[in-house]
Amino acid sequence: HIPKNGGTSIELLAAYNGVRLGMCAATDPGNFEFEFGYKTIPGFNCNVWHRPPLPPAFRSNDGKEEYGVIADSFCMSRNPFDRLASQYRYKSSVDKNEAPPTCESFSDFVDEHLEKMENNALLACLKRGVVSPAECQYHIRARLTRENKLSLDEIDDASSYGAEDCHFLPQTMYTRACETVFALEEYDASVAPFLEKALSLPPGTAASAEAE
């Protein structure tokens, strides 16, 4: 699921009703149980349920490689600022010394992580779209190995990403592989009825889920 967009609440609601999704479909932080999960883009070392899904590749009629969506998948988008603020509120609630509840500290926190993302080779490769998402990490590792300037550990760091458990990744890295995209701000109007139908729940049952 897209981190900080209400995924945990939905996955727990589904689990309580016998359906395994996201973190409830994982055997451990690094792996999905095969029949319940989906492929993720190589190179991300956050919890597997926070990793961007790998868009299914196919060949168009003219032979070009195109990317589709995962069948029967859904995800929720959220106002980007609200998403960042939610992440910082969580950190501040855990340790106010590390994340003081001030505008200045919040701004520094955002600037720091946006800079990390801008300088990350894996994210840059995925953004350029020159090679397929499945091959970005391989190409980075191959290039850095040929240059022979970094140790193996440094190559691992340079070809991967997992800061803040991937809570800062652009939402488009997830939504591009989703068959249905909802807006968290329209939870009661669109998401709750969808969940109630999918999980065979009485009307109004899913609306009680709190998304944060």
Image (tube, helix red, strand yellow):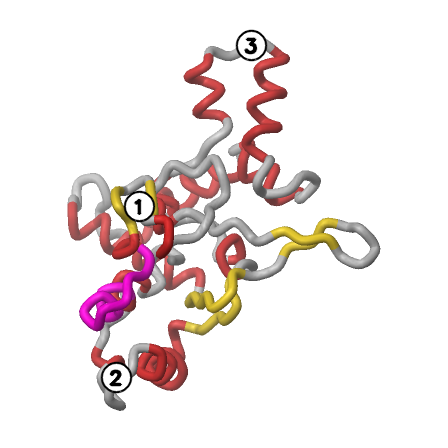
Asked if the residue under mark 3 is in contact with the one under mark 2, i.e. CB atoms within 8 Å, the reply is no
Pick whichever, 212 or 137, lies toward us. Answer: 137
Q: Secondary structure at mark 3?
A: loop
Single out the residue that lies furthest toward the right. 62
Q: Secondary structure at mark 1?
A: helix
Instruction: Identify the amino acid type marked 1.
Output: Ser
Q: Quadrant of the N terminus?
A: bottom left
- Packing grade of label 1 (10 A; few <14, some 14-19, many >=20) is some
Label 2, on which residue? 201
Asked if the residue under mark 3 is in contact with the one under mark 1, i.e. CB atoms within 8 Å, the reply is no
Q: CA distance from mark 2 to mark 3?
A: 57 Å
The x and y percentages for residue 149 are: 56, 9
Q: Which residues are magenta?
A: 11-22
**Dot 1 or dot 2, earlier in sequence:** 1
Residue name at image x 72 percent, y 49 percent: 65
Residue name at image x 59 percent, y 43 percent: 133
The x and y percentages for residue 36 are: 35, 56
Instruction: Identify the amino acid type marked 3.
Output: Lys
Label 1, on which residue? 105
Residue name at image x 56 percent, y 53 percent: 55
Residue name at image x 54 percent, y 35 percent: 122
Q: CA distance from mark 1 to mark 2?
A: 43 Å
Q: Quadrant of the C terminus?
A: bottom left
Label 3, on which residue? 149
